[in-house]
Image (tube, rainbow, N blue to C red):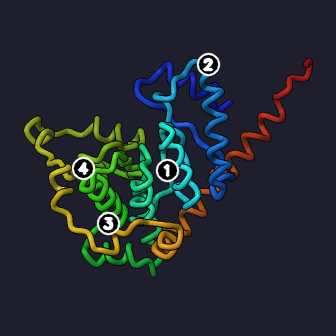
Amino acid sequence: ALVNVGGDLAKLVPGRVSTEVDARLAYDTHGIIRRVHDLLRLYDEIAVPPERLLFKIPSTWQGIEASRLLESEGIQTHLTFVYSFAQAAAAAQAGASVIQIFVGRVRDWARNHSGDPEIEAAIQRGEDPGLALVTKAYNYIHKYGHKSKLMAAAVRNKQDIFSLLGVDYIIAPLKVLQSLKESITSPDEKYSYDRRLSPQSAARYDFTAEELTKWDQLSLASAMGPASVELLAAGLDGYVNQAKRVEELLDKIWPPPNV
């Protein structure tokens, strides 16, 4: 079912189509790799080439390691549920093709919780923690020449987009796009917004020695604060529940009664 939908999307859109890997495999490196190989075989049967595909994997340590191994085979991966700099840096070191950060979810957590050092440091600097995380991850990727592209998701308003101008990819909700379209602005002002993120600005960004570590499972676990731990767990639970609901629906319609 995933491949049939992905194949139809590949006919409709340019670029790459991202196919989700079952979140129930999030802590099983080899299970993720086997599932991606299975999906690739099915895509091959309907003549969708690998260069048109991304495989969306949760950013657990096991998911990041699966991404590293798959990328070494030339298979493009899309790491999601990134809520800390440590996850983003580890994903970049693994060579993930796309790294996705949910701006609004980090902000929501910060409004309702405390005790996360990375978030509290951003707030003390007067910065929005979600936007600060995207900025820092973008600068790390581009300063140190990683091949990864950074994707900002869960943007909530126009200002989020203006604050992230220059990011590699952005997922903008329809209501935000509509709001941009309906904005009444003079042409001079409309085209005067400065690019906030660029390889040039990344080159000037300073990182601490701790941030430039070679990430492994232990250092990643110790660097992930409560926000990324809780948000990653919540994201996985949501994906697993959705997968179960889809399976229940498919069980009702397949096989057809007359087969």
* Residue under the image location 32 percent in, 66 percent down: 128
Quarter where residue 215 is shown? bottom left
- At numbered mark 3, what does the secondary structure look like: helix, strand or loop? loop
- At numbered mark 2, what does the secondary structure look like: helix, strand or loop? loop
- At numbered mark 1, what does the secondary structure look like: helix, strand or loop? helix
Which residue lies under the disc numbered 3? 128
- Residue count near mark 3 (Cα–Cα under 10 Å), binned few <14, some 14–19, many ≥20: some
Q: Is residue 79 above or below residue 250?
A: below
Any mark on residue 68, and which? 1
- Give the mark nearer the N terminus: 3 vs 2: 2
Give the amino acid at mark 1. Answer: Arg
Q: Is residue 95 above or below residue 116?
A: above
CA distance separating discs 3 and 2? 44 Å
Residue 253 in the image, given as x and y percentages of width and height: 82, 29
- Marks 3 & 1, CB-CB < 8 Å contact: no
Front tag of 1 and 4:
1
Q: Which quarter of the rendered picture does the C terminus lie within?
A: top right
- Give the mark nearer the N terminus: 2 vs 1: 2
